[in-house]
Image (spheres, rainbow, N blue to C red):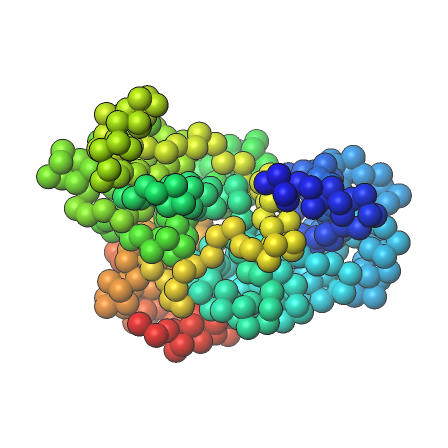
Amino acid sequence: MFGLRNRLGELEESGKSIKVCLVGAGLMGKGLVSQLTRVDGITPSVVVSNKVQDCVDAYTMAGIHSSDIVIARNTSDIDNAVRAGKYVATDLWDMAVRAGMTDVVVDATGVPDTGARIATTSIMQGKDIVMLNVESDVVVGPYLNRLAKQEGVVYTGSAGDEPGAVMELYDFAVSTGFKVLALGKGKNNPLDYHVTPQMVKEKAERSGLKPLRLASFIDGTNTMVEMAAMANASGFVPDVRGGHGPDTTVDKLPKVYSLKSEGGILNRYGIVDFAFGAAPGVYAIVTTDLPQVHHEMKFLKMGDGPNYVLFRPYHLTSLETPITIAKAHIYREPSIVPMLDRPVAEVITRAKRDMKKGEYFDGIGEETVYGSIEEYRKAKEEDLLPIGLLNRNARAKVDIRKDDFITHDMVQLDTDTEIYKLRQLQDSQTTS
């Protein structure tokens, strides 16, 4: 981090900066814009939202004067404004991504198909792409990562998002010689599989969140998505469908995440999971086969072993994204990417309520479905449907009962979406 800070300082001193195009100006996007104005060598040059006023608000909240904000709706006007040192607000993400004056695109939309389109366009425009959109990444991240490598750009998830924070612990543990047994995240909200946006509308609006976003946290889908991203980056798998989700405390995590034969809850090691009582942190359970290392861990007050917890008590979501932007552009390094050409884990679909044949679905955090995690190979064997492929044009082909796991043959999907097409390409190019 010392070297990265110096490199950013050098950019600032030379009058240059990494110019960022941010798509999505919700809670996380607004926070990122503010943070970027305080980082040497990075500029939030373009902000995109369906509501231009959200872009303007993101800038003004960061202390940028209205006279320095330009509303533009084509590539030429965007480029001219950025060249003049202005800040651009627009509601056309494709124009913003295709404009030539920005270096890195950040997708903070959280919409799977939109993320697939933004990422593909960014990559083909020769721009590094930072995905705060984990919902898209867990469906087609392997394909997008491979495409980015072919095109000579960086595809990456973000530092600060829980998967990125977990992988920092994983990399630290492996690089220092520990064996990693489990990776996990704390769950902030109570779990209610059947919550709807309307049920949390007031609470969401008080927090500056879309109601469907808060509902996706409470119904567990967001947790499943983040666990799948951890799995895809590490090669670890869910121990059981949906995860264990124990209610515990941080100091008990090493014992909880032991094998059943050792008094814990696990059937095997090399797993991802979530826990109540550990939020908003992330954790790695580690061990060693060396007596002297056990002795020193005990001396360092890390517990009696044989398992230990490395715990990070926070994750700062989009506020840490400047690190990923800088690493991608300066060092050509991702913060977190899928390790294989296929998923390791899949976020499969369950019915949030009874559905009749012919009814239309919606999407993540809405009225009809919620997500659960499963190993990719098992999901494939059972033909289980990735939740990120659903949208409002998808229809039930049969009657579906509440809490049923949904298979491909139960749904008429919208095959015109970018994410569907990319998933077809990803599946056709999967080697194992």
Against 296, is 1 above or below?
below
Against 209, is 379 above or below?
below
Nearer-the-camera pick, 208 or 152: 152
Residue pictured at 70% horizontal, 58% vertical: 103
Counting every numbered tag in the picture gives 0
Q: Horizontal and vertical percent for residue 167? A: 43, 46
From this viewpoint, which residue is outermost toward the front? 292
With 39 as the anchor, is 253 left or right in this view? left
Query: Is residue 369 at least partly visible in the picture?
Result: no
With 59 as the anchor, is 213 left or right in this view? left
Query: Is residue 10 at least partly visible in the picture?
Result: yes
From this viewpoint, which residue is outermost toward the left? 261
Q: Quadrant of the N terminus?
A: top right
Residue pictured at 67% horizontal, 38% vertical: 35
Nearer-the-camera pick, 229 or 5: 5
Q: Quadrant of residue 266?
A: top left
